[in-house]
């Protein structure tokens, strides 16, 4: 317990944090800022809803599993007008169905998983639809996919990607 902890106001800590943030940018494929939150993945999801929306904003939630259900609950808890597109657990969405519901959405919330082009929608396809909408953001929960699935955040047009450190 007497081990020296690095204080967060030291040059050593600043250098470590700078290197870590730089490595994270490369890891997820972005030149934009990366933030580290002292929270769980759900805390980061909640932070994205509370900071990107206001009560009454239309959001589109793509849900095909537990984390999609979590997005829906968070959006409703913050008073968003949540349009929900559901698919059975583990399935994907057709781009036509997403396109039919995206108009007027301020944010699209979805889980980022391994792309399954033969089975339907890919993250890249949804990002392209979001980019076609004025003032719409794409927030991707990659909590279970980050580190196991390739993400090109800037190349695909993802505005926010959320991951967390798994506790073992």
Image (tube, rainbow, N blue to C red):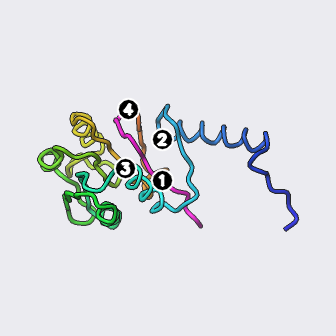
Q: Is label 4 in a helix, a strand or a loop?
A: helix
For discs 3 and 4, the disc positioned in front in the rendered view: 3
Q: Which residue is mark 4?
A: 155
The quarter holding residue 143 reads bottom left
Contact (Cβ within 8 Å) of mark 3 with mark 4: no
71 or 163, nearer to the observer = 71
134 relative position to 137: left or right: left
Residue 164, percent from left and from top: 51, 56
Q: Earlier in the sequence, mark 2 or mark 4?
A: 2
The quarter holding residue 5 reads bottom right
Q: Which residue is mark 3?
A: 140
Q: Which residues are magenta?
A: 155-168
Q: Is label 2 in a helix, a strand or a loop?
A: helix
Above or below residue 133? Residue 60 is below
Q: Is label 3 in a helix, a strand or a loop?
A: strand
Q: Earlier in the sequence, mark 2 or mark 3?
A: 2
**C-alpha distance separating marks 4 and 1:** 18 Å
Q: Which residue is mark 2?
A: 28
Q: Which residue is mark 1?
A: 163
Residue 67, percent from left and from top: 35, 63
**C-alpha distance separating marks 2 and 4:** 10 Å
């Amino acid at each position: 317990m007497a081990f020296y902890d690095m204080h967060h106001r030291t040059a050593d800590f600043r250098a470590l944090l700078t290197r870590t943030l730089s490595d994270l940018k490369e890891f997820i494929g972005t030149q934009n800022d990366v933030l580290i939150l002292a929270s769980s993945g759900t805390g980061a999801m909640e932070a994205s809803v509370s900071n990107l929306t206001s009560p009454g904003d239309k959001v589109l939630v793509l849900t095909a599993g537990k984390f999609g259900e979590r997005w829906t609950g968070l959006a409703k808890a913050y008073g968003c007008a949540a349009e929900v597109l559901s698919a059975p657990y583990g399935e994907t969405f057709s781009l036509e169905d997403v396109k039919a519901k995206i108009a007027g959405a301020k944010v699209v919330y979805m889980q980022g998983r391994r792309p399954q082009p033969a089975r339907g929608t890919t993250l890249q396809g949804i990002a392209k639809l979001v980019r076609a909408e004025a003032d719409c953001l794409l927030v991707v929960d990659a909590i279970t996919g980050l580190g196991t699935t390739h993400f090109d955040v800037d190349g695909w047009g993802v505005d926010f990607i959320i991951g967390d450190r798994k506790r073992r």
